Amino acid sequence: MSDVYILGTDMIKFGRFPDRTIPDLGAEAALLALKDAGLTIQDMEAFYCGNLGQANAMVGQRILQEIGQTGVPVVNTANACATGATAFREGWMAIKAGVYDLVLVVGVEQMGRGLLGGAGGGKGIPKEGLLGSGTMPSVFAEAGMEHARKYGTTFEQFAKVSVKNHHHSTMNPKARYQIETPLEEVMNAEMISYPNTKLMCSVNVDGSAAAVLASEKKAKELGLGRAVKVRASALTSDPWQERDLVMPDVNTCTRKAAQTAYEMAGVGPEDIDLVELHDCFATAEILHYENLGLCGDGEAGKMIDEGHTALGGKTPVNVSGGLLSKGHPLGATGVANIYEVTTHLRGEADKRQVEGARIGMTHVIGLGSACAIHVLEKAS
Amino acid sequence: MAEEAAASKPLPVVPYLKIPDDGEPYLEGLKCNACGAIYLTERRACSKCGTVDDLTPIRLSDKGELYVFSIIHRSFPGIEVPYVSAVVDLEGGGTVKGNLINIDPTPEAVKLGMPIELTYKIAPRKDKEGNEYLTYYFQPRSQ
């Protein structure tokens, strides 16, 4: 089977664009990625488009109406917060299978403001605030409290994740925010769902990101100069867990995907130079240090305390600013992660560059659940 | 006669809350006869082991311990905050989620692993037909 390469990738600066349309946002990223690859829409043999909010509305085809209706197959994906990464993986699989040599991937989302989630639908009366909370800050607060229960992780340790990622974003012009948030400010921000304060919740933004994927044959023909190789692609759903009727489990599906990805790539956590992982809430990032094997079980609190995941540390995590500060446009996030890691492997990340980065990992979790992990490597 | 009007007795807030004509309300789980996994809602096969059509209703305990919680300070409009959202492991199996009441909603007061008991009350909300609902809450239990 062919290896798969990223020839071009880009993202728009995340922000709030209420006057623009979803196809317009997606089209902008698509054209940027095509330009980065030195190719055009006429070169693309298929198009994989991730969007959640309008999953029933043919977003991919509407993007092509803005950039070129070439008649190629379009696949629209929806997989919660793993939507963009799922589109990327579908493109990867099609090339891997030898069906196409060049495909386009776009992830795009336009978000409202405010809380996501909410407990139970069903018949009768609303359950939110009566049978606990199903809001996302609460769900991830409870996932964090499970870690606190096992290992004594503190509110302060969770808050440090947010300090770090906001600091990273000051070096990323494409992040929604470029603002330092000292520890006291994070801990004293409005409490949303203890232990997640407002500054420990990801930012709802509009955004898009895109990538052009190529077969090995095509990549070599066009030149491997800035190409990045996809060493692994893994996607899991959530295996049965004792408490998953009332507590979505983001750990087991991540561990399973990480194991698959490491095996496929033939590398271990010690080989990973940087990680973009799903910090939808500060509590979540702590869990994923262990889920991705970046440290042993119970060591994540120490890892954030000792700065190992900050830029300059052993394994920098979310140097883009993460979902906490770069922002989290659900369907775009998985592709934006790919853009970030690729940019480092190309040595083009400017002030936030992870020096000498050769191998990087991306991770997203969509509740419900879906976990996608990709391992990328510098091609030459 | 009054068939279209509100029901004369409260309805269960969720299908797994049972209200016997004679006796106290309780929560009912469904246990897989093959592997022992416990569910709160019906399904065609066991999610854990895949055994088809072999779930038996069981009465869940009214006692348990607090597995995890979060304290909600911001919710949707109209929902009173702060309150404690709690996940409770019941004695003998089954895990349920609900509001923890009769406790100060602060991280100092709420303790992971604390003993919990269920209490049943009329919910402070009605549906648009005016029906009342019986719901369950968690409260601290002396050991």
Image (cartoon, rainbow, N blue to C red):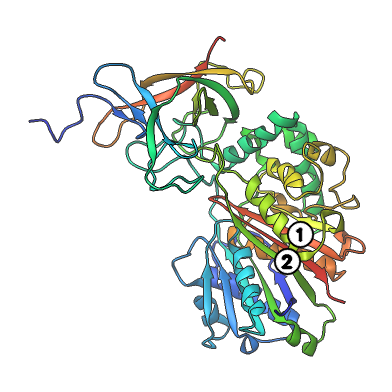
Give the side of residue A309 with respect to residue B75, left or right.
right
- In-front residue for pair A137/B91: B91
The answer to whether residue A320 is visible is no
Query: Spatial distance from mark 1 to mark 2, Cα to Cα?
Result: 7 Å
Question: In the rendered image, which quarter contains the C terminus of chain A?
Answer: bottom right
Q: Quadrant of residue A149?
A: top right
What SS does tag 2 mark? strand
Question: In the rendered image, which quarter contains the N terminus of chain A?
Answer: bottom right
Question: What residue does disc 1 label?
Answer: A262
Question: What residue does disc 2 label?
Answer: A232
* Chain letter of disc 1 in the image: A
Measuring 81% from the left and 69% from the top, which residue is drawn there?
A377
A61 in relation to B78, above or below: below
Give the side of residue B10 with respect to residue A43, left or right.
left
* Chain letter of disc 2 in the image: A
- In-front residue for pair B33/A193: B33
Measuring 34% from the left and 21% from the top, which residue is drawn there?
B25
Q: Quadrant of residue B61?
A: top left
Measuring from the top left, give residue A325's x and y in whole percent. Answer: 72, 51
Label 1: how many Cα within 10 Å (few below 14, some 14–19, many 20+): many
Measuring from the top left, give residue B126's x and y in whole percent. Answer: 31, 31
Measuring from the top left, give residue A108's x and y in whole percent. Answer: 59, 66
Q: Amino acid at mark 2?
A: Ala
Give the side of residue A285 with respect to residue A17, left or right.
right
Tell whether label 2 touches label 1 (CB within 8 Å): yes
Farthest front residue in view: B34
Discs 1 and 2 carry the same chain letter: yes
